[in-house]
């Protein structure tokens, strides 16, 4: 695609990152080769030498993800956590990172159990409380990682406001945009410096590939260090994983928008039901995050959570009765999933014990509502 920036995001989702394809195959070939031949004079046919340092499928995926997020460059990894870990490895021992109090539990574990041993300091911050943000910034962090809407209670952080405060304190602002995707929310355009993705979720979209990505804004001198961590420590996606992710991206706009519309229907049903104690979804007009979400994103996403009346035992019995929803962790696939989030997060979890997290898929909304209705008992 010659002038990708002039096309709309749906068009770019289909065509961005297209690479050389001498046979004209409409679906791109997969390059499984780990190594690339030199001619008699020692010259290579392209920039590719060895697939840990680069291969055509990964390059195509990186170009496409960078394009959708409006970033200068994207560096892809074997999982979302490998992406976050690699980003943190670009920092130095002694550096401070601000992470959300309700960060993805894997991010918390990485910070507390792995990177702390290497001298990286993390302060868990409530980015919705200005005084907490200021107290964190006063300690001189190198990086703040935001997650919005958050997991699992969908609290919405004002990206532009927090990024501006970070910049005035000399910190970079990264946003984990996994739950929104660039179709619904583009953090770089709101002032963030870095976007993180677990491409395992909506980019793949079919619960069959793990992946991660870090996208860097124009003018930020981070890419060489990040590229070094990627190619020299080696947490890279396989060519087939990169190919599957690129294929998933082609239908990303359709999937996330339809899934979000259905999530809103489910949230409205749950919110109006006396058996449900509380529904967390920023698309509900009374939700505390509704106004900021409406301003900074093009939709409310396909994740929601709710608390049942009757405590943990009742939450688990509701889960035992679902017939159409699949009881599994993760999100972003075409099949709707439900999980008891506290159980998945483990004994340290602060998630309410009566909370059920829902990833809304592509089934008909009426079928999903009927299933929840019968499961609520
Ligand atoms: C799933 C997820 C991750 C981790 O991604 P993996 O591919 O499982 O390593 C990170 N952040 C968020 C918000 C996620 O949902």
Image: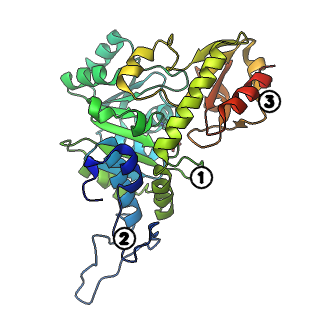
Quick check: marks 3 and 2 in contact, CB under 8 Å? no
Q: Position of residue 223 (x, y in %)?
A: 26, 49
> How far, Cα to Cα, is label 3 from label 2?
49 Å
Mark 3: is the Cβ under 8 angstroms from ligand 1?
Answer: no
User: What residue is at 45 percent from the left and 33 percent from the top?
Assistant: 180
Q: Is residue 341 left or right of residue 148?
A: right
Disc nearer the start of the sequence (2/1): 2
Say which element carries label 1.
loop
Q: Which residue is label 1 attached to?
A: 208
The foreground one among 205 and 233 is: 205
Q: Residue furthest bottom?
A: 40
User: What residue is at 31 percent from the left and 14 percent from the top?
Assistant: 135
Q: Position of residue 373 (x, y in %)?
A: 75, 22
Among the 4 quarters of the image, the one containing residue 26: bottom left
> How far, Cα to Cα, is label 1 from label 3?
25 Å
Quick check: marks 2 and 1 in contact, CB under 8 Å? no
Q: Give me the disc on residue 50.
A: 2
Q: Residues within 10 Å of mark 2 (few under 14, many from 20)?
A: few
Say which element carries label 2.
loop
Disc nearer the start of the sequence (1/3): 1
Q: Give me the disc on residue 60.
A: none
Q: Position of residue 107 (x, y in %)?
A: 47, 34
């Amino acid at each position: 695609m010659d002038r990708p920036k002039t096309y709309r995001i749906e068009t770019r989702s289909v065509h961005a990152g297209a690479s050389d394809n001498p046979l004209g195959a409409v679906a791109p070939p997969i390059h499984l080769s780990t190594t690339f031949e030199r001619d008699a004079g020692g010259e290579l046919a392209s920039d590719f030498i060895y697939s840990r340092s680069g291969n055509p499928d990964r390059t195509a995926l990186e170009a496409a993800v960078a394009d959708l997020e409006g970033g200068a460059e994207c560096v892809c990894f074997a999982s979302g956590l490998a992406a976050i870990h690699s980003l943190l490895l670009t920092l130095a021992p002694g550096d401070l990172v601000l992470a959300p109090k309700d960060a993805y539990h894997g991010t918390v574990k990485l910070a507390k159990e792995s990177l702390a041993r290497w001298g990286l300091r993390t302060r868990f911050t409530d980015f919705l409380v200005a005084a907490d943000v200021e107290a964190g910034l006063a300690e001189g962090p190198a990086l703040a990682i935001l997650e919005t809407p958050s997991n699992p209670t969908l609290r919405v952080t004002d990206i532009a406001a927090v990024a501006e405060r970070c910049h005035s304190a000399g910190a970079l602002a990264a946003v984990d945009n996994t739950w929104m995707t660039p179709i619904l929310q583009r953090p770089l355009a709101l002032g963030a410096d870095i976007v993180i993705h677990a491409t395992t979720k909506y980019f793949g979209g079919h619960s069959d590939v793990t992946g991660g990505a870090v996208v860097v804004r124009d003018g930020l001198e981070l890419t060489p260090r990040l590229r070094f961590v990627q190619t020299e420590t080696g947490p890279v996606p396989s060519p087939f994983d990169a190919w599957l992710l690129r294929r998933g991206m082609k239908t990303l706009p359709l999937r996330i928008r339809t899934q979000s519309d259905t999530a809103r229907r489910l949230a409205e049903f749950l919110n109006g039901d006396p058996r449900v104690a509380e529904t967390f979804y920023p698309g509900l007009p009374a939700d505390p995050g509704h106004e900021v979400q409406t301003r900074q994103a093009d939709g409310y996403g396909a994740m929601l959570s709710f608390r049942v009346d009757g405590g943990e035992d009742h939450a688990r019995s509701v889960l035992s009765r679902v017939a159409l929803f699949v009881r599994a962790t993760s999100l972003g696939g075409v099949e709707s999933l439900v999980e008891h989030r506290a159980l998945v997060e483990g004994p340290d979890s602060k998630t309410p014990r009566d909370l059920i997290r829902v990833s809304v898929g592509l089934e008909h909304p009426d079928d999903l509502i009927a299933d929840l209705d019968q499961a609520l008992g």
